[in-house]
Amino acid sequence: MKLDDKAMDMINKALKEFGATDRVKKMEAGFGGGKCPKHIVDFYIRDKNYFAFLMGTIYNQQMPAEHVWAIPYNLFKILGHLDPLKISNMSVRDILSLFDKLPRKPRYPPQMAQQTIEGAKKIINEYRGNVENLWADNPTCSQVQKRFEDFKGIGQKKAAMATETLVKKFNIPLRDRSGLDIAVDSLVIRVFKRCGFVDQEDKNLVILKARELNPEYPGILDRPCWEIGRSYCFPTNPDCNNCPIGDVCLRRI
């Protein structure tokens, strides 16, 4: 069974209404949805530690966000700097030694150490040593997302989240908000397929459908879908009766 336009609009509306609730708004892009201590958030936003933000984006993998964003902060406390040039000249062993001093290491330390060094080198070689040059030429949101994706360790989901955080938390005036894509993971894909938006569990189909449904801001469905996937739309035995879109979802299980 396929959705007609009216049914699709009803599900899209229900998702956006759920996204406007306090429960979901607290999860808005950036630094753990209010779970990060204020001094760590200030370290990024108030002090404009953009290379630390790039590092945190790389480390943002299979860890609670408040733990992820504490890692660059604590590295800064240990080193006394997060200078891309100095870090680009470090070895993987040097970085691993720093990780050993952290209250919590990132997942996959050798891989993250290598990506830290490669990220620093990319900033030095392609952005004249300054992360802010990623967006200094008045680019669109989609252009900045693509630039994030060019860093090792940053895929579509991380890049979309980072771009949205620049706009919503750092207040970077990127052009064309229609380029703020949905951040796709397995939870979002599952919700899109089961509600009938897409026929296959395919990341690219989800991105295209999100753009079609909300061309002015495709990423608006990101967090409501993620929360539904996490709290209701389980791989087995989904809680459809209590799901916020249960009354309109196609329930393709």
Image: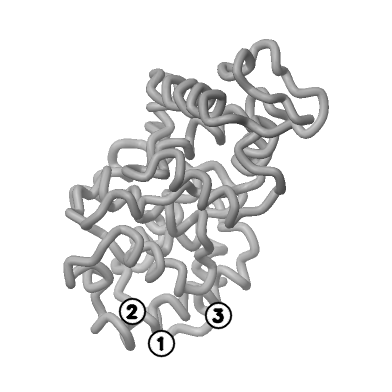
Q: Secondary structure at mark 1?
A: loop
**Front tag of 1 and 2:** 2
| Picture disc at residue 123 | 2
Q: Secondary structure at mark 2?
A: helix
Type of the residue with mark 3: Val
- The crowding category of the residue bearing disc 2, from other C-alpha atoms within 10 Å (few below 14, some 14 to 19, many at least 20), is many
- Front in this rendered view, residue 219 or 98: 219
Q: Secondary structure at mark 3?
A: helix
Q: Is residue 135 visible?
A: yes
- The crowding category of the residue bearing disc 1, from other C-alpha atoms within 10 Å (few below 14, some 14 to 19, many at least 20), is few
Cα distance between the residues tagged 1 and 2 = 13 Å
Query: Where the N terminus falls, by quadrant?
Result: top right
Q: Is residue 4 above or below residue 218?
A: above
Type of the residue with mark 1: Asn
Query: Where the C terminus falls, by quadrant?
Result: top right
All told, the count of numbered labels is: 3
- Front in this rendered view, residue 22 or 146: 146
| Picture disc at residue 89 | 1
- Name which of mark 2 and mark 3 comes first in the sequence: 3
| Residue positioned 28% across, 62% down in the render | 50
Task: Tell me the quarter of the picture where residue 72 sits.
Answer: bottom left
Q: Is residue 43 visible?
A: no
| Residue positioned 33% across, 48% down in the render | 165
Type of the residue with mark 2: Ile
Percent coordinates x, y for residue 130 in the rendering: 24, 75
| Picture disc at residue 178 | none
| Residue positioned 24% across, 45% down in the render | 42
- Front in this rendered view, residue 121 or 176: 176
Task: Tell me the quarter of the picture where residue 234 sits.
Answer: top right
Task: Return the residue at label 3.
Answer: 92
Percent coordinates x, y for residue 69 in the rendering: 42, 50
